[in-house]
Image (cartoon, rainbow, N blue to C red):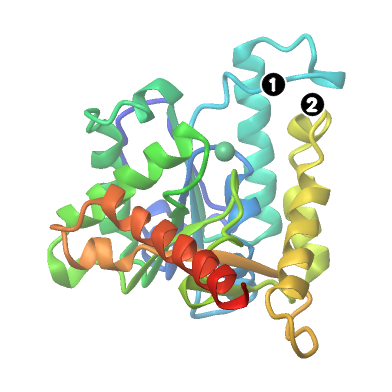
Amino acid sequence: MKFNFDTAELFVPDGLPADEALARTTHLCLAAHQDDIEIMAANPILTCFQQKDKWFTGVVVTDGRGSPRDDLYKDYSDEDMRVVRFIEQKKAAFVGEYAAQVMLDYPSKMIKDGANQQAVDDFVKLLKATRPQFVYTHNLADKHDTHVGVALKVIEAVRQLPQKERPEKLYGCEVWRDLDWMTDIDKVPFDCSAHENIQMALVGVFDSQISGGKRYDLATMGRRKAHATYFASHGTDATIGLSFGMDLTPLIADPAIGPGVYVQEYIQRFAQEVADRVDKLR
Ligand SMILES: [Zn+2]
């Protein structure tokens, strides 16, 4: 498969030919950086784990060159970091038994450029090759520009597909901002109770980032536990791990809806809920 950059990579953990590996995909995640997939999409990875009829494919959009570095990696050049992060992403794909792992190798600045169409074209190619039922990307209230840039390009790519080729569902997931603030009715809860050992391995292989002084592994598992307990104030916990999604499907069903207006509606429902409770109890 040919992507915009010749340096893009496609890794198939079980060695199937690339076209066949992509075609078996049922759950597709498109994320900005190496490790974002494992932070935000544990539920679909585990849903597909060891299943004959469900397959997870991961797509990492950026090149990892600008990654922070410390400890073992402190003297690494940008190119060394890119290589390390590609290897770490392949380790995760192997542990999680992904159908395929694609690395598109874009510099972040191209993703933060709303007018740039090259990544959108790559996404369209991947969506056509995978025909997934479910698609996961970043949520529109994330606070990292590159994350929101990827989400907007994913929405654009899905909108370019003929209606009958579009996925059934598109979800925005949590990395650089929890979705705990959304009203409960707006939250799409993703159960992350299964195989905590695999979940920990998936976030644990990204040593260059964790050694860089950020305990993403502990923070990610902790966030899932916190969501499981704080989701409902009455009754006992229904899960031991939970992450939240923002349903972005209406944006692909109706291209007339602007992504900015759409996310503002979530914020307004949250604002209204807070205001109503304070008014009711005064
Ligand atoms: Zn990221």
- Identified by mark 2, the residue type is Gly
Q: Which mark is residue 68?
A: 1
Residue 1 relative to residue 30: left or right? left
Task: Look at the image and tell me in which quarter the C terminus lies.
Answer: bottom right
* Circle 1: element type: loop
Image spot of residue 45 (x, y percent): 60, 65
* Circle 2: element type: loop
- Rendered view: 225 above or below 205: below
Image spot of residue 270 (x, y percent): 48, 63
Q: Earlier in the sequence, mark 1 or mark 2?
A: 1
| Residue drawn at (55%, 55%) of the image | 15
Q: Residues within 10 Å of mark 2 (few under 14, many from 20)?
A: some
Task: Look at the image and tell me in which quarter the N terminus lies.
Answer: top left
- Identified by mark 1, the residue type is Pro
The reply to whether residue 162 is in sight is yes
Residue at the limit of the structure toward the front, as seen here: 282
Q: Is mark 1 within 8 Å of ligand 1?
A: no
Image spot of residue 233 (x, y percent): 73, 80
The reply to whether residue 55 is in sight is no
| Residue drawn at (45%, 33%) of the image | 146
Front residue of 118 and 128: 118
Residue, disc 2: 212
Q: Are marks 1 and 2 in contact (CB under 8 Å)?
A: yes
| Quadrant of picture, ligand 1 | top right
Q: Residues within 10 Å of mark 1 (few under 14, many from 20)?
A: some
